[in-house]
Image: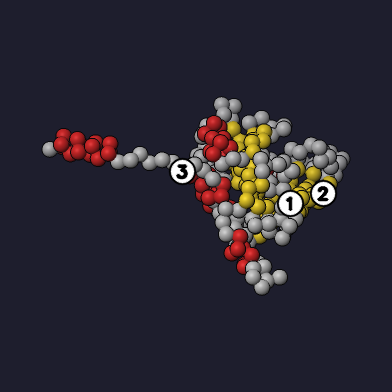
Amino acid sequence: MMGRIAAVSALILAAAPARSQTPFKFEGETSLADMQAKVRQDFPVGSPRDRVRAVFVDQGGAALKLHPTQAGVEKYIYDINLCSYYVWRWNISADYDGAGKLKQLYVNGEPALPNGAPPRVLPKDPPGQKGSIVKITRPRPEAFKGERSLAAIIYDHDADLNTIDDQELMGGGPTRADPANMGTMHIYRVEPWRSIFDMDDARAVAPYAGDCAAADAAMGKGAGGK
């Protein structure tokens, strides 16, 4: 009897169509919380670098950027034009060990893996020298209906913007990649290179995949709006 059940089960499985994995799209994750949950589910500590790149770069279309000074650190950036009101940036950065195994993933500069390596401790101000506070601006001309530029503040421990490993950034951005409902303001305190304010360019600014008419109506710029 058990043999017959096993044989029938094998036939059913063989006849069932194979499930095809849906390629990853950055547009599929609407909020910071969604992306954090996604990376926790798909990329546990120890995931190989090639698999992470395959998802974010090959499937998602992100630009791959290697850290200019830190070995084993890279990021995947992807921009979305939210109906010309705001350019949303996904900055997914990753730390790998010497064997190319994942130690920690960051979503817009914030660590996402609870059991991953802790964030790097920034150095203190050099002896006898004070750091500097600098306001930076990231132009976003595509957002001509809304925020044409993004502003943030950098605290630079050695007062030299050319040395990036001792910098802390504070700035705010929305929590949702939805022009009709961009959520609330989220305050970041992160390394500038891992942030939504970094000056590296994505491959392109992707158009919003949803309904811009709904966004215009929400912003009061639909029919009869100003």
- Which mark is first along the chain, 3 or 1? 3
User: Quick check: 84 above or below 97?
Assistant: below
Image quadrant holding the N terminus, namely top left
- Which residue is labeled 3 in the image? 22
Measure the C-alpha gap from mark 1 to mark 3: 31 Å
Q: Quadrant of residue 194?
A: top right
User: Quick check: 154 above or below 13?
Assistant: below
Please name the residue shown 59% across and 58% down the image: 178
Residue 11 x/y as whole percent: 23, 37
- Which mark is first along the chain, 2 or 1? 2
Decide: few, some or many residues near mark 1? Use Cα within 10 Å; few <14, some 14-19, many ≥20. some
- SS of the residue under disc 2: strand
Three-letter amino acid code at the position of disc 1: Arg
Measure the C-alpha gap from mark 1 to mark 2: 19 Å
User: Quick check: 138 above or below 97?
Assistant: below
Please name the residue shown 86% across and 41% down the image: 129
Please name the residue shown 54% across and 31% down the image: 50
Marks 2,3: beta carbons within 8 A: no
Residue 60 x/y as whole percent: 56, 41
> How many numbered marks, from 0 up?
3
- Which mark is first along the chain, 3 or 2? 3
Three-letter amino acid code at the position of disc 3: Thr
- Which residue is labeled 1 in the image? 140
- SS of the residue under disc 3: loop
- SS of the residue under disc 1: loop
Decide: few, some or many residues near mark 3? Use Cα within 10 Å; few <14, some 14-19, many ≥20. few
Q: Quadrant of residue 61?
A: top right
- Which residue is labeled 2 in the image? 134
As drawn, which residue projects farthest toward the front?
A: 223
Image quadrant holding the C terminus, namely bottom right
Left or right position of 192 against 223: right
